[in-house]
């Protein structure tokens, strides 16, 4: 049976979900300075991984700049 989504597309989706989760954790830990400083690093790491996955689709970060 053929998969509905390619593995690289699934990896990209997973990274987007991880970024979404980081945003939720930031809101959950408002007021906790230690926890708040942990999340920007994690978010940046996920974004870098996502940029790498987008390159596999021949999409450059500037192609999706808001």
Image (cartoon, helix red, strand yellow):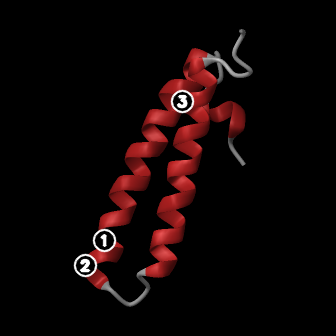
| Residue at figure coordinates x 70%, y 31% from the top left | 63
SS under mark 3: helix
Q: CA distance from mark 1 to mark 3?
A: 26 Å
Residue 42 image offset from top left, x and y in percent: 36, 54
Q: Earlier in the sequence, mark 1 or mark 3?
A: 3
SS under mark 2: helix
Which residue position is annotated with label 2?
34
Q: Residues within 10 Å of mark 1 (few under 14, many from 20)?
A: few
Q: For the residues carrying marks 2 and 3, which lies nearer the camera in this image?
A: 3
Residue situated in front as seen by the camera: 44 or 12: 12
**Tag shown at residue 37:** 1
Q: Is residue 7 left or right of residue 32?
A: right
Residue situated in front as seen by the camera: 55 or 10: 10
| Residue at figure coordinates x 38%, y 45% from the top left | 45
Residue situated in front as seen by the camera: 63 or 52: 52
**Tag shown at residue 4:** none
């Amino acid at each position: 049976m053929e998969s509905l989504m390619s593995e690289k597309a699934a990896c990209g989706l997973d990274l987007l979900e991880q970024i979404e989760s980081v945003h939720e954790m930031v809101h959950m830990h408002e007021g906790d300075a230690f926890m708040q400083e942990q999340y920007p690093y994690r978010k940046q790491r996920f974004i870098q991984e996502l940029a790498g996955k987008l390159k596999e689709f021949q999409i450059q970060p500037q192609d999706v700049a808001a």
